[in-house]
């Protein structure tokens, strides 16, 4: 008798679906994903590339935010980095040379001569300061040193001693001149960040005369000072500075010039009488010749110009009583 019972295994095989028989399994669409390419995205090569790109971006940002770095980078790209560095070196040398020139020590010499020679000469030294020590960068330091000195500051002042301050007027002492040798015009600190400028106010005074005031400076751009004669230091040679001082003859006040005025008027009167006599004799004497003789007479009695003479003449003629008395003296004057 045949046994129709089947082995469970064989029964399972009989129950397989068509898909199972074909070796396929049915799944939902969401479950049919190909997982062959799944894995971490930030692998080592990717991280390296991203870091390089980030650093490159930061580097370019730094370069283009600095004008100097920008110039260097562009010179590098153009293949001119060596030439660019040479230009930088030369520019630095030029800056250093200009700083040295602007801060160099300068000294000057001059001789004061004047009349009357027993006048008192007051020499006031004024020291101004330009402080650029806050600038450590050469470019900023140079820009500061090129600036204008602040003359509104209160300078350090001192009086320069000289022989005219110690004359014995009772003994009628006089001096021919006052030499000032190697007096400072400009000095600088050792690190060349602070400049000291020296200016000199020279007052020449004598009792009975109008004083004259001179102001000596090495800065030709300095604002003018009222009621003084400005004199400027100029370089005459290597390390040699001088001012164009042509002497100072003080103008006498009318009362001081009165006696010289009387003597000059008498001499002029004699010249007038002589010229009138010669012309009556038929001699041709031009007015220009007469004016030249008049000026010689005035100079002999201390009047340098017709303008100075006219000023004294006008002032003395304001005293009508004195003029009347002097006219009587003139009429009685006899020429030699």
Image (spheres, grey):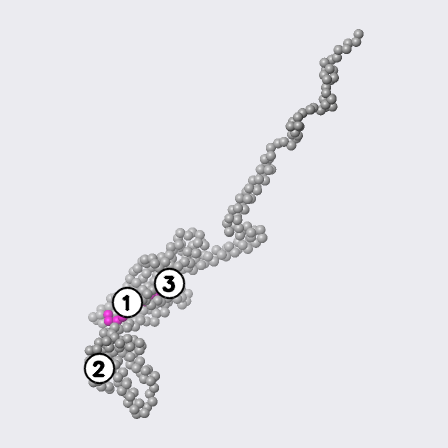
Residue 177 spot, x, y in % from top left: 30, 70
Does residue 90 sit above or below 19 in this rendering? below
Q: Is residue 70 visible?
A: yes
Which residue is depicted at the point 24% across and 86% down?
A: 335
Q: For the residues marked 1 and 2, what is the alpha-carbon distance in whole angstroms?
A: 38 Å
Which residue is depicted at the point 42% across and 52% down?
A: 135
Give the crowd class for mark 1: few <14, some 14-19, many >=20 residues within 10 Å. many
Q: Nearer the observer, disc 1 or disc 3?
A: 3
The residue at which mark 3 appears reads as: 222
| 325, 82: nearer the viewer | 325
The residue at which mark 1 appears reads as: 121
Which residue is depicted at the point 28% across and 67% down?
A: 121
Residue 80 spot, x, y in % from top left: 57, 54
| 72, 107: nearer the viewer | 72
Give the crowd class for mark 3: few <14, some 14-19, many >=20 residues within 10 Å. some
Mark before the other along the chain sequence, 2 or 3? 3
| 317, 39: nearer the viewer | 317
SS type, badge 1: strand
Mark before the other along the chain sequence, 1 or 2? 1
| 14, 78: nearer the viewer | 14
Query: Seen in the image, is 126 located left or right of residue 22?
Result: left
In the image, is residue 217 part of the stretch drawn in magenta?
Answer: yes
Q: Work out which residue is located at the far right of the displayed protein and give it.
A: 1
Which residue is depicted at the point 72% across and 17% down?
A: 15
Q: For residue 101, what is the image quadrant?
A: bottom left
In the image, is residue 242 part of the stretch drawn in magenta?
Answer: no
The residue at which mark 2 appears reads as: 327
Q: Which residue range is magenta in the image?
A: 207-224
SS type, badge 2: helix
Query: Seen in the image, is 209 located left or right of residue 286?
Result: left
């Amino acid at each position: 008798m045949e046994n129709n019972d089947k082995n469970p295994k064989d029964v399972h095989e009989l129950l397989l679906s068509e898909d199972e028989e074909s070796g396929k399994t049915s799944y939902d669409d969401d479950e049919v994903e190909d997982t062959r390419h799944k894995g971490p995205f930030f692998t080592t090569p990717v991280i390296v590339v991203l870091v390089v790109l980030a650093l490159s971006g930061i580097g370019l940002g730094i370069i283009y935010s600095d004008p100097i770095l920008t110039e260097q980078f562009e010179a590098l790209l153009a293949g001119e980095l060596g030439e660019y560095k040479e230009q930088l070196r030369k520019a630095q040398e030029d800056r250093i040379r200009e700083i040295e020139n602007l801060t160099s020590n300068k000294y000057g010499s001059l001789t004061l001569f004047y009349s009357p020679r027993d006048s008192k000469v007051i020499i006031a030294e004024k020291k101004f300061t330009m402080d650029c020590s806050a600038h450590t960068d050469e470019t900023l330091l140079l820009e500061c040193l090129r600036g204008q000195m602040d003359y509104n500051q209160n300078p350090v002042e001192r009086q320069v001693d000289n022989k005219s301050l110690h004359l014995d007027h009772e003994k009628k002492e006089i001096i021919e001149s006052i030499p000032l040798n190697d007096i400072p015009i400009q000095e600088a600190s050792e690190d060349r960040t602070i400049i000291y400028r020296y200016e000199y106010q020279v007052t020449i005074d004598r009792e009975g005369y109008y004083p004259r005031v001179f102001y000596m400076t090495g800065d030709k751009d300095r604002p003018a000072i009222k009621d003084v004669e400005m004199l400027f230091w100029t370089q005459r040679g290597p390390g040699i500075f001088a001012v164009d001082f042509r002497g100072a003859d003080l103008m006498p006040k009318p009362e001081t010039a009165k006696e010289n005025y009387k003597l000059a008027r008498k001499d002029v009167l004699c010249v007038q009488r002589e010229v009138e006599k010669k012309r009556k004799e038929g001699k041709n004497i031009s007015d220009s010749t007469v004016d030249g003789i008049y000026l010689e007479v005035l100079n002999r009695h201390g009047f340098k110009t017709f303008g100075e003479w006219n000023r004294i003449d006008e002032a003395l003629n304001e005293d009508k009583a004195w003029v009347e008395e002097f006219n009587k003296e003139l009429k009685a004057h006899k020429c030699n």
